[in-house]
């Protein structure tokens, strides 16, 4: 343990000692009990609210459907952009886990989706707290976790089925095992991350490489090469597959946006800046991770501001435990005020620039708040509107009903022609039915020739057409009749 880390192991300051010294339950302290209780609330809250299916969920459910039905991981994505498809390049570990959940639940893809959607955010908070506790002690970890729990967009991207959120959680654990030179756990964590997501683990690896170069005299560079080498070896089967189809990969500009929780940045930024003065400390790896996330800004602007909250929140605990608590008198009173404000911002509302991001994930608005205020995840779940407490929300009901018709009236691998502006509907059909469609998601793997082939199939060979706005019918050249009407979604069959 570094000297800097040892400074965080001191007893609670006098102003808190009388309150917390008696609160010890087994290996857990008062601070631990509060955090674990919050994690339990997030788990129960997410289970109660559904959570609703949105955006990325449909793609991952669709892949899990194919693995469950085939019994193996297909390397060609034939269920999107039929009839040609495209390479299946998304690392399949989460999809395999979902397929196994489907197997134990009798093929219920909704059960598999719900387990992942309910568990991801609590796992992220738990891994973050455990990592911060290992680096800075229970008190600082408590402050950091309160800061993390104030950012509702982090909840919103985590209750989507998004392997990147799990990578974010495992990154926190990997930083702890790596700095402690725990070889096997570090190899396992890095390998799992590589099998979860195609790009996010690279940012973690960059941060660890930079940390290893800074601490190379302590043998970290050699340790990094061991961890990296063995984890890549474990990942090599899929890596070879990705490399063979590298020409299919391209960058995709996703919607921008900004989210800056003011209290988190105000309390985290001082320690983040001052961390360059103690770069020999183990927690300096979080500093390097902050900068390694910058590439996300250029392709996924919204996600950058959400993901960067993780390392900035970590430094909130460092600021309060190392810099503010090292002074007495009025500084001690200031710390009490800051801690109370921090806890309030984790449980009620938090000042934020870009708080409107809470609605971008498709969740109904919960509170009418003034500008620059955002509800916290705790309040978000506590006041979730009862009508929206379901995986199938009213706006998703038409495509869900259409999928039920498709299940009854089509063959298992019969391509479904989708015509509409919302390509998420095409992925939802595959997610709910397992049928391939002429639409698809994940724009990072795309080829114009594939889209042309799908268009030709629609006009010449299609048999079942799901039509949504702005279209009213299939192309005029297709002889067809209306088979089912679900409001904005209609089903036609070729005659």
Image (cartoon, rainbow, N blue to C red):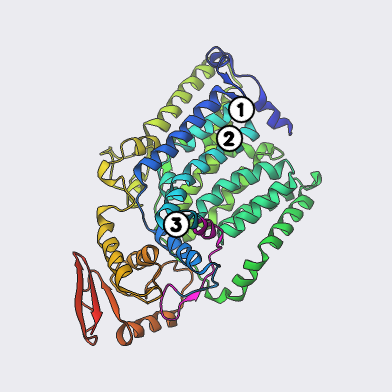
Q: Which mark is residue 106?
A: 3
Q: Secondary structure at mark 3?
A: loop
In the depicted structure, whether residue 478 falls above or below residue 259: below
User: How far apart in space, not on screen, are marks 3 and 2 (Cα)?
Assistant: 51 Å
Residue 404 occupies which quadrant of the picture? bottom left
Q: Which mark is residue 443?
A: none
- The residue closer to the viewer here, 260 or 418, is 418
Asked if labels 3 and 1 touch by Cβ distance under 8 angstroms, the answer is no
Q: Residues within 10 Å of mark 2 (few under 14, many from 20)?
A: many
Residue located at (69% from left, 31% from top): 5
Q: Which residue is mark 1?
A: 322
* Residue 450 locus on image (x, y percent): 43, 80
* Residue 120 locus on image (x, y percent): 48, 46
- The residue closer to the viewer here, 207 or 418, is 418
**Residues in magenta, as a range:** 79-100
Indicate yes or no whether the magenta region holds residue 449: no
Q: Which residue is mark 2?
A: 271
In the depicted structure, whether residue 439 falls above or below residue 6: below
Asked if labels 1 and 2 touch by Cβ distance under 8 angstroms, the answer is yes
Residue located at (52% from left, 14% from top): 19
* Residue 73 locus on image (x, y percent): 55, 67
Task: Answer with left or right where residue 228 lies relative to residue 358.
Answer: right
User: How far apart in space, not on screen, are marks 2 and 1 (Cα)?
Assistant: 9 Å
Indicate yes or no whether the magenta region holds residue 90: yes
**For the view shown, which residue lies furthest in the top direction?**
18
């Amino acid at each position: 343990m570094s000297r800097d880390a040892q400074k965080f192991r001191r007893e609670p300051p006098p102003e808190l000692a009388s309150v917390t010294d008696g609160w010890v339950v087994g290996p857990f302290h008062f601070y631990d009990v509060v955090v674990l209780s919050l994690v339990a609330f997030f788990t129960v809250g997410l289970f109660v609210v559904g959570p609703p299916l949105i955006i990325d969920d449909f793609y991952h459910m669709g892949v899990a459907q194919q693995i469950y039905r085939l019994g193996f991981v297909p390397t060609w994505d034939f269920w999107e952009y039929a009839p040609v498809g495209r390479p299946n390049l998304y690392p399949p570990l989460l999809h395999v886990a979902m397929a196994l959940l489907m197997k134990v639940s009798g093929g219920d893809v909704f059960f598999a989706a719900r387990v992942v959607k309910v568990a991801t955010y609590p796992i992220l908070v738990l891994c973050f707290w455990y990592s911060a506790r290992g680096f800075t002690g229970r008190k600082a970890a408590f402050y950091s976790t309160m800061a993390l729990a104030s950012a509702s967009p982090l909840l919103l991207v985590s209750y989507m089925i998004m392997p990147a959120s799990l990578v974010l959680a495992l990154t926190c654990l990997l930083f702890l095992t790596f700095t402690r030179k725990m070889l096997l756990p570090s190899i396992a964590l890095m390998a799992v991350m590589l099998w979860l997501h195609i790009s996010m683990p690279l940012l973690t690896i960059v941060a660890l490489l930079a940390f290893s170069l800074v601490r190379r005299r302590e043998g970290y560079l050699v340790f990094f090469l061991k961890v990296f080498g063995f984890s890549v070896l474990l990942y090599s089967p899929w890596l070879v597959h990705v490399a063979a189809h590298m020409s299919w990969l391209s960058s995709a500009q996703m919607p921008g946006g900004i989210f800056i929780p003011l209290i988190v940045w105000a309390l985290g930024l001082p320690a983040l800046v001052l961390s360059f003065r103690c770069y020999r400390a183990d927690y300096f790896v979080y500093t390097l991770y902050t900068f390694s996330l910058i590439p996300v800004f250029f392709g996924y602007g919204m996600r950058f501001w959400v993901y960067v909250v993780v390392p900035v929140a970590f430094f909130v605990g460092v600021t309060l435990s190392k810099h503010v608590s090292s002074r007495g008198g009025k500084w001690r009173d200031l710390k009490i005020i800051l801690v109370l404000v921090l806890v309030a911002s984790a449980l009620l509302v938090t000042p934020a620039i870009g708080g409107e991001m809470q609605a971008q994930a498709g969740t109904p608005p919960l509170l009418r708040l003034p500008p620059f205020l955002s509800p916290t995840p705790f309040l978000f779940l506590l006041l979730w509107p009862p009508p929206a407490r379901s995986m199938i929300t009213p706006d998703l009901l038409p495509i869900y009903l259409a999928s039920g018709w498709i299940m009854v009236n089509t063959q298992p691998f019969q391509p479904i022609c989708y015509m509409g502006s919302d390509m998420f509907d095409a992925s939802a059909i595959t997610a709910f039915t397992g049928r391939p469609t002429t639409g698809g998601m994940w724009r990072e793997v795309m080829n114009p020739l594939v889209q042309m082939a799908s268009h030709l199939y629609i006009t010449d060979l299609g048999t079942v057409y799901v039509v949504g706005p702005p279209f009213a019918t299939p192309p005029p050249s297709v002889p067809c009749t209306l088979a089912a009407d679900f409001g904005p979604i209609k089903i036609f069959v070729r005659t």
